[in-house]
Each structure stands twice: as structure tokens, then as C-alpha cells.
Image (tube, rainbow, N blue to C red):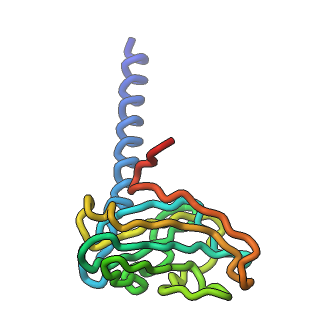
Amino acid sequence: MKKRIGRLVLGMLGLGAVLSFGSSARAQISSPPNLQGQPAVHAWSVPGVINSQGLGTFFACTNTLGSTVTVGVEVFGPAGGAALNDASATSLAVAPGATVLFATSPPVGFTIDSNLSAGLVFKGSARVLATTSSKASQQILCTAFVADASFSPPTSMTGLNVIRRNTQQGE
């Protein structure tokens, strides 16, 4: 009986450790950095970011709000952790109705508005940040794609899923 209670206590302690580790891992994702000195919210998540072998990842965002909003993109490596770029330094003020294009590296053949300078990324993710409320950030419309950045026109291109914050909808 004592052995059984001891195992139960150890199991509860292990579960507690796993749960507390899980919530500390989520805390980093829910705490975006300021963009150009303004508080920001995490609007969109993008898995599948690549910046290697001539491929780059591109993020196009349109502001459908009635006021200017600062938008930034943070890129993360396969292990997560700290961002590979400075989202504040590469963020842009997006006027109402305007569209901007961010890229992990500059392409040949078309123009980008902000080079994220993410370095080499074989498999990563990104999050789009905005200086607006969480609800209003839904009106910052974004899409993402991976394209051959070495040729004009690109010889390959594929879309990436853009997911509302931490939840995937429609699947």
C-alpha cells in the first residue's frame, strides 16, 4: 500500500512538473515584443518558414482598419526559443488599405518592403505582430508563401497556412 501511494505521489509530482513546463513554454509565445516602442499583439502564426537553398518565405499583409497600424514579423528556428530577427527594427507602419511585403531574404525579380534578415532557416515558424487590439488584429489580413528567391520570375512557389494566433480554424 505504501509503495502504491508513493508511486501515486511521484506520478502527481511528474504531472505537475509537465504542466508547469507547458505553461512556461506558452508564455513566450503570448508575450510579443513592442514594435517601434508600441505594445503589440500576436495576430497570426505561420508554420513552415524556410530560408535556405535559394528558397525564401514571404509575408504579405494588408491593413483593412481605418487607421495606420505597425506590423512586424518574428521568425523562429526549428527549436523555437528566441526570435531569429528583430521584429521591431523590421516592422512597418501600414496605412489604411495598404499592403506590405516582408521576406526572410531579398528576392530577385520583385520588390519587398522589409527584409527580415532571418539567416539560415531549414524549418521554422513565424508570427505576425500588430500594434492594435487583439480583436482588431483580425483585420490585418496576411498570407504567406515560400518561393524561389534566386530567379526572376520564381521557378517555384507554394502557399503556407496562416493560422489565427495559437488556434487553427477550418480543419
Is residue 9 left or right of 126 when viewed as pictured? left
Vertical order, 95 against 33 (above or below): below
* Residue 25 in sight in this render: no
- Residue drawn at x 53%, y 63% as measured from the top left: 125
- Residue drawn at x 51%, y 41% as measured from the top left: 171
Expressed as whole percent of the image width and height from the top left, the position of residue 82 reads 45, 70
Considering depth in this image, is 74 or 130 the residue closer to the camera? 130
Is residue 71 left or right of 132 when viewed as pictured? right
- Quarter holding the N terminus is top left
Numbered label tally: 0
Is residue 121 left or right of 60 when viewed as pictured? right
Considering depth in this image, is 136 or 40 the residue closer to the camera? 136
Vertical order, 146 against 168 (above or below): below
* Residue 8 in sight in this render: yes
Considering depth in this image, is 58 or 78 the residue closer to the camera? 58
Expressed as whole percent of the image width and height from the top left, the position of residue 147 reads 66, 73
Q: Quadrant of residue 150?
A: bottom right
Expressed as whole percent of the image width and height from the top left, the position of residue 109 reads 66, 88
Vertical order, 85 against 137 (above or below): below
Expressed as whole percent of the image width and height from the top left, the position of residue 130 reads 32, 71
Extreme residue in the top direction: 1
- Residue drawn at x 59%, y 68% as measured from the top left: 145
Is residue 25 left or right of 126 when viewed as pictured? left
- Residue drawn at x 39%, y 23% as measured from the top left: 8
